[in-house]
Image (tube, rainbow, N blue to C red):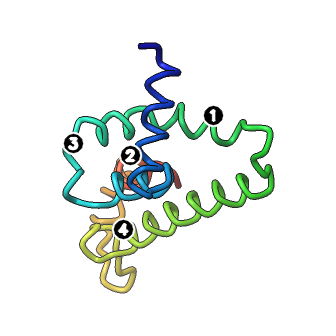
Amino acid sequence: MTTTDQVDALLEAFDLVGISASEFLVELLTNPHYTTHENTINLRSCSPCIIKLLTGHPEASAGGVLKWAGDIIKHRCALEIQELSAKKSGYHFSVLHASVEQLEEFDIEELGGGMQQRAPFM
């Protein structure tokens, strides 16, 4: 059986059970029941290639794709800002209560390294 035959059989199965390919993928990727399923793991590992294929399709809206990508980056950056600004991050600093010794021991490289680890997209 060729790959085309296998895909045709799957498409027929989708029609038979009354689910679209997109509904199937959304369920597979969002339902915790399928998190560790071999096919879910495979989809996640192949996601860069799948996204490239979807966004490179002639019928894909370039503006829509760019907005989608921008929204993902904005969301990720907002999460990183929240993480860095949280008290538990250890980056809070009170100038009013700082000692000369604390100021002298301050290491901008160490601060930058820690921030880069916690917020790689920023």
Q: Are marks 2 and 1 in contact (CB under 8 Å)?
A: no
Disc 4 versus disc 2: nearer the observer: 4
Q: CA distance from mark 1 to mark 4?
A: 33 Å
Q: Residues within 10 Å of mark 4 (few under 14, many from 20)?
A: some
Dividing the picture into quadrants, the one containing residue 37 is top left
Return the residue found at the far top: 1
Q: Earlier in the sequence, mark 4 or mark 2?
A: 4
- The residue that disc 4 covers is 83
Q: Earlier in the sequence, mark 1 or mark 4?
A: 1
Q: State the residue in front, 34 or 78.
A: 34
In the image, what residue type sits under mark 1? Leu
Q: CA distance from mark 2 to mark 1?
A: 35 Å
Q: Is residue 75 above or below residue 59?
A: below
SS state under label 4:
helix
SS state under label 1:
helix
In the image, what residue type sits under mark 4? Glu
Expressed as whole percent of the image width and height from the top left, the position of residue 85 reads 40, 74
Residue at left offset 24%, top offset 72%: 88
Q: CA distance from mark 1 to mark 3?
A: 23 Å
Q: Which mark is residue 37?
A: 3
